Amino acid sequence: MNAEILKSIFNEFDHKSKYLSYSELNSGHINDTFLVKTISGKNFVLQRINHNVFKNVPGLINNKVLISNHLKSKFSHLSNEDLTSKVLCFVKSKNTDHYYYKNGENFWNMMIYIENSVTHEIVKDKEIAYEGGKLLGQFLNLTSDFDSRKLVDVIPNFHDMSFRYRQYASSLQSASKIRLLKATEYTKIVAGLKEEMHILQQLKEAGEIPVRVTHNDTKISNSLFNKENKSVCMIDTDTIMPGIIHYDFGDAIRTICNAAAEDEKDLTKVEFNIDYYEAYKKGFLEQTKDSLSEIELKYLPLAVKTMIFIMGLRFLTDYLNNDIYYKTDYPEHNLDRAKNQFKLIESFSQKLTNTI
Ligand code: GN1
Ligand code: MG
């Protein structure tokens, strides 16, 4: 990214600061994210939103701002400074939208950077797992009185299993012979788990599990912690939409309890950590148990399996589609991610059966 261009985009926002420098943040698989430092020492996160993935960027930004404002209203007792370290605060562009867009180019949005915070790609401490569970529980509690119908579906059917199976089925039709061959072992797993992997969706559709505001991308690297390992704030709110708590619980556990990174190739390192599962669940339930129904509680373990699976399925589909969705660093990156997730399911199933 050219620094002059980035600076000029930064200056489209109403930040009242003077640009100093930028660096790229490890931003995940879809958007591009930059940390911008200013002369006064106030720092910002400037983000280019991938509009091939997110078809309705103004709707997405509106969702994020609505939830940010809702959270701010819950922390109204805090000073402005404390508030900006508890809630993602978005900065308006000079034309007063919460995004900057130049015709035919990209959408950008900007947040105040939360100082003294760290993220974890891999969890190596039970306390972090516990704190992570508390943070998600708090987030779900604080947003539980927000009418989720006011949010747009930024990616329709995002965690809908039938939709993901349909995408997968069409990727099987168009995949190259060589990619199909490399995926064979996993296509069998996908076929074998089909029925079980639809249970949560069926309960949702039958109205047995309530729909509410959910984050939908709760991997642990989307939670900020302070240097004393206390949880601070959930970030990456692009996919906030109506959903069920199982999406958020399961996706968080998928990353917290994997002893390896999501794309670790050495599958012997991919192991489900049951202690972290218990610690996360403890933190989560301390916050939410009074508001969850029996059926919601009953299906937490299945949520874990389902969310690990849906990510494996999506990575596999993208591999079969020649890597058109996720950013990849090498040709088999998506296949490695898929293998990793399927190995994690295996380990999860073993560990959980042994403890119950
Ligand atoms: C994507 O871009 P990032 O890393 O925040 C994906 C999530 C996956 C995640 C896997 C919009 O999130 O659903 O869980 O990769 N986001 C979208 O790491 O597809
Ligand atoms: Mg994300």
Image (cartoon, rainbow, N blue to C red):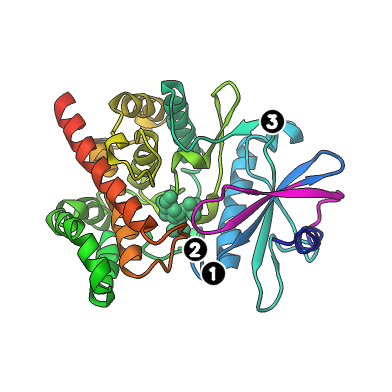
Secondary structure type for disc 2: loop
Residue 179 in the image: state x and y as whole percent. Answer: 27, 67
Crowding around mark 3 (Cα neighbors within 10 Å: few <14, some 14 to 19, many 20+) is few
Front one among 126 and 329 = 329
Secondary structure type for disc 1: loop
Quadrant of the picture in which ligand 1 is shown: bottom left
- Circles 2 and 1, Cβ within 8 Å, touching? The answer is yes
Specify the segment rendered in magenta: 13-36
Residue 172 in the image: state x and y as whole percent. Answer: 23, 71
Q: Disc 2 marks which residue?
A: 152
The residues tagged by marks 2 and 1 sit, at their Cα atoms, a distance apart of 9 Å
Task: Confirm whether the magenta stretch covers residue 231.
Answer: no
Between circles 2 and 1, the one closer to the viewer is 1
Tag 1 or tag 2, which sits nearer the N-term?
A: 1
Q: Disc 3 marks which residue?
A: 77
Q: Disc 1 marks which residue?
A: 56
Q: Tell me the quarter of the picture where residue 252 sits.
A: top left
Crowding around mark 1 (Cα neighbors within 10 Å: few <14, some 14 to 19, many 20+) is some
Q: Amino acid at mark 1?
A: Asn
Mark 1 Cβ and ligand 1 under 8 Å apart:
no
Residue 285 falls left or right of residue 348: right
Between circles 2 and 3, the one closer to the viewer is 2
Front one among 279 and 331 = 331
